[in-house]
Amino acid sequence: MPLRYTDLLAQARASVRELMPWDLAAQLAAAEPPLVLDVREPREFAALRIAGALNVPRGVLEQASEWDYDETEPALAGSRARAIVIVCRSGNRSLLAAQTLQQLGFADVISLATGLRGWNDAEQPLVDGDGRALDADTAEALLAPRLRQEQRRPR
């Protein structure tokens, strides 16, 4: 029987460490903070993000994490031994991205459980594309699911 998306997430969750937003906030305040890797699409990243996060969309993650490719992101490719916390909107894409980086030999990757939605719910700061702080209500509206009718399961 073929796997479903929820099966892939369950498999990733079994091998990927997760941390909660307040734990990431504490790590970001430390002397050596982790690299925050945001795997959302560029338009999502432009709308809001954790200040200082690096954007590498999940679709180019493998090439971005290796040297000598058009998509190589030096800040990521050079961080194989560094702590990396991967974030997305809800914590699902980050789980799959963390699993991929583990497979590629990255030593210390963690997924942000609950994603940026949970980060915002925990009243942690988010900024817009110009680096201006966003209030929690504005961020919540930007993070809301946008499921169209044709994307719903047929009845």
Image (spheres, rainbow, N blue to C red):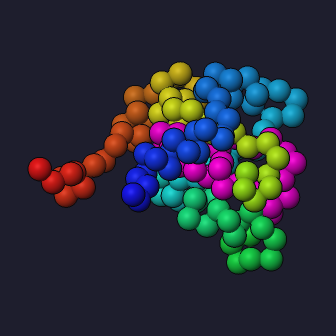
Residue 74: x, y in percent?
80, 63
Q: Is residue 53 left or right of residue 150?
A: right
Residue 62: x, y in percent?
68, 65
Q: Find out whether residue 82 is within the magenta segment.
A: yes
In the image, the segment drawn in magenta is: 73-101
Residue 63: x, y in percent?
69, 70
Tell me if I can see residue 131 in this picture.
Answer: no
Q: Please give the name of the residue rendered at 24% of the width and 55% of the height, measured from the top-left corner.
A: 151
Up/down of 93 relative to 90, above or below: below
Q: Quarter of the image for the N terminus: give it.
A: bottom left
> Which quadrant of the view contains residue 137?
top left
Q: Find out whether residue 134 is within the magenta segment.
A: no
Q: Please give the name of the residue rendered at 73% of the width and 23% of the height, measured from the top-left corner.
A: 26
Depth check, front residue: 81 or 154: 154
Residue 40: x, y in percent?
53, 53
Up/down of 123 relative to 58, above or below: above
Residue furthest toward the left? 155
Depth check, front residue: 63 or 138: 63
